[in-house]
Image (cartoon, helix red, strand yellow):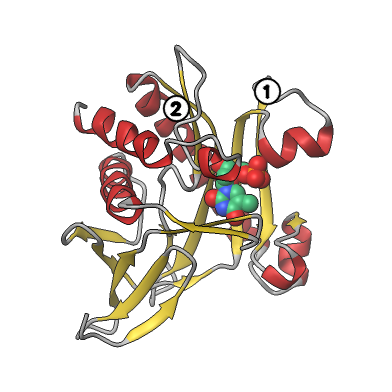
Amino acid sequence: MNSELLYEGKAKQIYATEDPEIVIVHYKDDASAYNGIKRAQITNKGVLNNKISSIIYSQLADAGIKTHFIQRLDDRNQLCRKVDVIPIEFIVRNYAAGSMAARLGIEEGTKLPTTIFECCYKNEELDDPIINEHHAVALGLSTYEEMAEVHKIVERINELLIPLFAKLDVILVDFKTEFGRLEDGTLVLSDELSPDTCRLWDVETQDSLDKDRFRRDLGRVGEAYQEILNRLMKL
Ligand code: TMP
């Protein structure tokens, strides 16, 4: 790519365009877990996540969710609005799994009686600690008003994604979102929604069709991502 590289993360690169308010998001095949301790390349992961996330973001936009996504350009690249990223991961859980199941001693797969919302401060040195809105405000990451607005939006996203995945015979166990602010301050969903950032279980078999296949060495990682894309394309 000829454009200026503005930022490189674990799974994506951000490139400048001629318009200072628009960037190209480039999806790589690099996978990492446990705060970068486990790393690998998963052939074609970037292509699959780019396509999966583009479909999901388009559906969310059609339902009125404001996002950074403009359009998918090709196999690995998306055109997106440039955002000032809020360094908080907003996690939504419908079933106990992963870190919450371990932390609270709840059996993985237990349906939660209420939707759980968690925030993590994106800070690798601190291992992305779990925080609440008071910490977010005290750390200067956000305001109470903005945290409340994000909460409402992620709740709505969950309400939209549960039935979307149900149509694919997939249970949306949990997922992570990130938000950013446009130049004019508008809050928008940013980053991606893909098997890298969601736990997706097959309704019939309860098989993981997501990054847990990489985290837990379950094998057939790329095949699981491809399966999610195949089902999404049939919608
Ligand atoms: P967790 O159970 O490991 O806290 O993960 C909850 C959800 O958030 C799960 O769908 C995976 C996703 N997630 C990310 O996308 N990025 C991360 O850095 C972490 C920790 C979780």
Q: Where is residue 124 in the image (x, y as percent from the top left)?
A: 68, 69
Quarter of the image that includes the C terminus: top left
Element at label 2: helix
Looking at this view, is 173 or 204 the one in front?
204
**Circle nearer the N terminus (1, 2):** 1
Q: Where is residue 161 in the image (x, y as percent from the top left)?
A: 41, 33
Residue at the outermost left position: 74
Residue that mark 2 sits on: 162
Residue that mark 1 sits on: 112
Residue depicted at 33% across the width and 20% down the height: 167
Q: Is mark 1 within 8 Å of ligand 1?
A: no
Task: Determine contact: label 1, label 2, CB under 8 Å.
Answer: no
Residue depicted at 42% across the width and 35% down the height: 220
Answer yes or no: is residue 151 visible.
no
Residue type (three-letter) at the residue carrying disc 2: Ile
Q: In this view, does 182 lie to the left or right of 33?
A: left
Q: In this view, does 108 lie above or below 57?
A: above
